[in-house]
Amino acid sequence: MATIFTKIINGEIPGTFVYEDDECVAFLDVSPLTDGHTMVVPRAEISQWTDLDEGLLDHLMNVARRIGRAQKEAFDCERIGLMIVGYEVPHVHIHVWPTTSMADFDISDRAPMQDAEMLAGPAEKIRQALAQQS
């Protein structure tokens, strides 16, 4: 059975995408830790990051770095957080988000579910900053 992330990637469930290529996508988390919280997800359903082949792992981390640099440009933050958890969905996903303190790492303190309209502004900021990187 397809994971929720595969359904988002395939357009069966809406997602607010900020990046896509042949190997992965990046879309905003609907229950963000902070504005701009993005998940980098491989198109392939791989349950654990330790099972990724080296090339895909490198690619995902490079995309996460690009997203993080764009977030640093787009949002008023001190640092960019990065976390791989893997319990909530059995499909590798890298959380990347703007942070201003260690409190921003408390995964139990997430925002309520947001709809596409609420995510549109942060997504556009990231897309614009990504476009400036090229």
Image (cartoon, grey):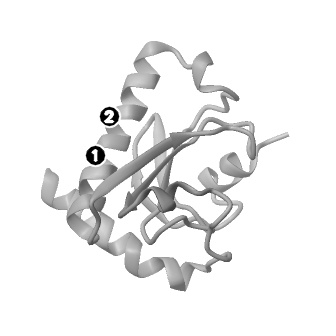
**Mark on residue 120?**
none
Label 1: state its secondary structure: helix
Counting every numbered tag in the picture gives 2
Percent coordinates x, y for residue 90 in the rendering: 74, 37
Q: Which residue extends farthest bottom? A: 117
**Mark on residue 62?**
2
Q: Considering the image in quadrants, where does the N terminus appear?
A: top right
* Residue drawn at x 42%, y 33% as measured from the top left: 60
| Residue 64 versus residue 19 in the image, above or below | above
Q: Nearer the viewer, residue 125 or 100?
A: 100
* Residue drawn at x 60%, y 51% as measured from the top left: 9
The picture quadrant where one finds residue 35 is bottom left
Percent coordinates x, y for residue 32 in the rendering: 56, 66
Task: Give left or right: position of 52 versus 8.
Answer: left
In the rendered structure, are the residues bearing label 1 and label 2 in contact, judged by CB atoms less than 8 Å apart? yes
Tell me which amino acid carries mark 1.
Answer: Arg
Task: Give left or right: position of 72 versus 58.
Answer: left
* Residue drawn at x 54%, y 64% as measured from the top left: 33
Q: Nearer the viewer, residue 2 or 108?
A: 108
| Residue 37 versus residue 24 in the image, above or below | below
Label 2: state its secondary structure: helix
Q: Which residue extends farthest front? A: 102
**Mark 2 nearby-residue class (10 Å; few <14, some 14–19, many ≥20):** few
Tell me which amino acid carries mark 2.
Answer: Asn
Percent coordinates x, y for residue 58 in the rendering: 38, 24
Q: CA distance from mark 1 to mark 2?
A: 6 Å
- Per the image, the residue denoted by label 1 is 66
